[in-house]
Amino acid sequence: MAVLFSILMLALLIGALVDIITRRDDQVKYLPKAFWIILVILIPLAGSLIWFLVGREYDREGIRMPRPARERRTPDPAPAPARPADSRSTEQQIADLDREIEEWRLRAEIEKRRKAQGGGEKGAEG
């Protein structure tokens, strides 16, 4: 009878240690994993039973359930978006900007002439 009790206690001890070691930190309740390991080694029967009763996280079906992390970790900042590579030389960029400025100036002048013509026609008709 004593041999059977010793074998069962050893199996319980090994099962508890394996469960503690393989469990993630966020699935361990009340104490850090190192303290649970020490407790189970120093007090094999009581430590193992306490571990299985209160130390590990269970969901309703008895399967492991992840707990939210104890410490809030700040997410890594997203990398800055890469700047678009422009293969044009500085002179080409300046020339493109000059053309764009000239285009906007011409559009404004066309719009101004349209308004002047539209205003003149209304005045001549009325």
Image (cartoon, rainbow, N blue to C red):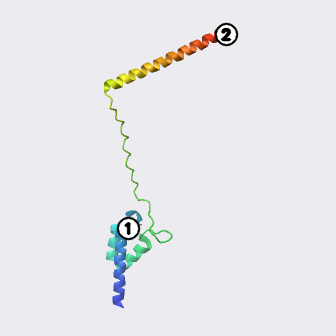
Q: Nearer the viewer, residue 39 or 109?
A: 109
Q: Position of residue 23 (x, y in %)?
A: 38, 67
- Report the quarter where the C terminus lies: top right
Q: Which residue is mark 1?
A: 23
Residue at horizontal 39%, vertical 53%? 73
Three-letter amino acid code of the residue under disc 2:
Glu
Dot 1: element: loop
Q: Position of residue 28 (x, y in %)?
A: 40, 66
Distance Cα–Cα, label 1 vs label 2: 90 Å
Height in image: 91 above or below 6? above
Left or right? Give the position of 124 relative to 108: right
Dot 2: element: helix
Three-letter amino acid code of the residue under disc 1:
Arg
Left or right? Give the position of 87 relative to 105: left
Residue at horizontal 61%, vertical 12%? 119
Height in image: 68 above or below 16? above
Residue at horizontal 50%, vertical 15%? 109
Residue at horizontal 32%, vertical 76%? 42
Q: Position of residue 108 (x, y in %)?
A: 50, 18
Choose top left, top right, bottom left or bottom right for residue 91.
top left
Counting residues from the N terminus, which is met first, the one under dot 1 or under dot 2?
1
Q: Nearer the viewer, residue 49 or 67?
A: 67
- Report the quarter where the N terminus lies: bottom left
Q: Which residue is mark 2?
A: 125
